[in-house]
């Protein structure tokens, strides 16, 4: 990797403060044995942890980040360096099982190749099974000398409290809209003509998660959920039916769809309440709503979306297709079949 390319590596502007703190800990020999980075998905928390791991094994960390020139850096970073281990679920599985944590314990017990100490990264620590969590706890209770463990998660609530309490917790903020736009711009091909207003709109609808937008945008594609607002408009104006909308939504994935419906209705409610609906697609939707009581309607819609999301996340095993049909029926203004 050239020095120029390292510019596009983390830490990104919204992560600088946390990076600075870690760098100071490293320089003063005050690193913790284990860190838990908490941050929203799509904002680069795992990339941050991997880059920090690269920095920890770099032979020349004077610049305050991995140099990308030394032997350690050139050996390929988190994927190939013999002192770095990435703990992911086994092929085809969603959970991180106890077997992976046994591998981790063995890895950490061995001597470091470069003398810099061993570093292991567990992205999505929520994926640890209960027995894996308990095994990890032992590793955390008796840390190997010089070893550093980097965990990342969306929220600390998904982890055993005993694991949380043995890690130094660091919140990784997401980007401000302007920083996210600048970040996306750097990654889009020059030929890609998309206005800042459009990028701001897409980021807002997608919860300010630039890392999740970048692959589709740079490939010139629109992910399925981009079409959701158009679908809502088509429904309101009678161009598509409820069953067709529900079938399209099922292809995107119901939890993704309900998450977006929640965000879109929030954006509309806020815009209408402030008398300033931003973004062409949001304005078109707001205008197509029946003028009388539109805010009350949206609040009820949002409430039902929230209920449906809770049902989907709960143990009741609801029929997602029926939930989608019900919410689209409500959106079109027909009497809804009760979601609750
Ligand atoms: Zn280096």
Image (cartoon, rainbow, N blue to C red):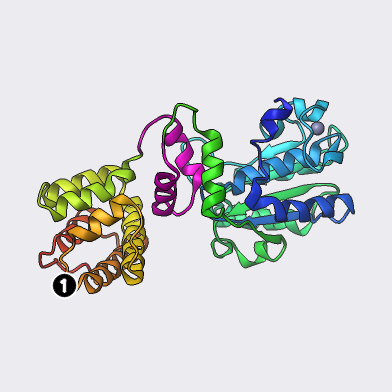
Q: Quadrant of residue 59?
A: top right
**Quadrant where the image shows the N terminus:** top right
Residue 246 seen anywhere in this rendered image of the structure: yes
Name the spot of residue 275 as percent of width and height, x first. 32, 68
Q: Give whichever of 125, 290 is nearer the camera.
A: 290
Q: In which quarter of the image is ligand 1?
A: top right
Q: Is residue 318 above or below residue 79?
A: below
Magenta: main secondary structure: helix
**Image quadrant occupied by the C terminus:** bottom left
Label 1 element class: loop
The residue lying toward the viewer, choosing from 311 and 190, is 190
Q: Give the range drawn in magenta.
A: 194-222
Q: Residue at image x 54%, y 53%?
A: 129
Residue 319 visible in image:
no
Tell me residue 54's x, y (percent): 74, 38
Q: Mark 1 points at which residue?
A: 292
Please state the horizontal and vertical placement of residue 209, each as a whole percent of the image.
49, 49
Q: Nearer the viewer, residue 75 or 270?
A: 270
Does the beta carbon at disc 1 come under 8 Å from ligand 1? no
Q: How crowded is mark 1: few (under 14 residues within 10 Å), some or many (20 or more)?
A: few
Location of residue 114 in the rendering, given as x and y in whole percent from the top left corner: 86, 33
Residue plotted at (54% across, 51% down): 178
Q: Which residue is rendered at x = 77% and y = 43% of the image?
A: 108
């Amino acid at each position: 990797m050239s020095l120029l390319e390292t510019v596009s590596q983390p830490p990104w502007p919204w992560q600088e403060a946390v990076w600075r703190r870690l760098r100071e800990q490293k320089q003063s020999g005050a690193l913790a044995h284990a860190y838990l980075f908490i941050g929203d998905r799509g904002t680069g928390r795992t990339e941050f942890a991997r880059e920090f791991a690269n920095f920890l094994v770099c032979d020349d960390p004077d610049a305050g980040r991995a140099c990308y020139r030394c032997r350690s850096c050139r050996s390929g970073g988190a994927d190939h360096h013999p002192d770095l281990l990435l703990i992911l679920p086994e092929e085809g599985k969603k959970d991180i099982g106890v077997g992976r944590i046994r591998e981790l314990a063995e890895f950490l017990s061995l001597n470091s190749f470069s003398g810099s100490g061993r570093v292991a990264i567990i992205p999505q620590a929520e994926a640890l099974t209960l027995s894996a969590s308990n095994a990890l706890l032992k590793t955390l209770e008796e840390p190997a000398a010089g070893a550093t463990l980097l965990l990342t998660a969306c929220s600390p609530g998904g982890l055993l409290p005993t694991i949380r309490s043995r890690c130094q917790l660091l919140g990784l903020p997401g980007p401000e809209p302007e920083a996210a736009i600048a970040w996306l711009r750097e990654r889009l091909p020059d030929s890609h003509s998309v206005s800042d207003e459009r990028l701001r709109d897409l980021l807002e609808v997608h919860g300010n998660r630039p890392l999740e937008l970048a692959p589709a945008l740079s490939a010139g594609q629109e992910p399925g959920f981009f079409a959701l607002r158009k679908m809502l408009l088509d429904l309101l104006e009678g161009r598509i039916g409820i069953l067709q909308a529900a079938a399209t939504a099922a292809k995107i994935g119901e939890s993704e769809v309900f998450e977006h419906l929640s965000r879109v209705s929030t954006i509309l409610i806020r815009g209408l309440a402030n008398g300033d609906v931003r973004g062409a697609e949001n304005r078109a939707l707001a205008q197509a709503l029946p003028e009388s009581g539109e805010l009350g309607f949206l609040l009820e819609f949002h409430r039902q979306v929230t209920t449906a999301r809770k049902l989907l996340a709960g143990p009741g095993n609801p029929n997602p297709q029926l939930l989608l049909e019900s919410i689209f029926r409500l959106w079109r203004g027909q009497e809804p079949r009760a979601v609750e």
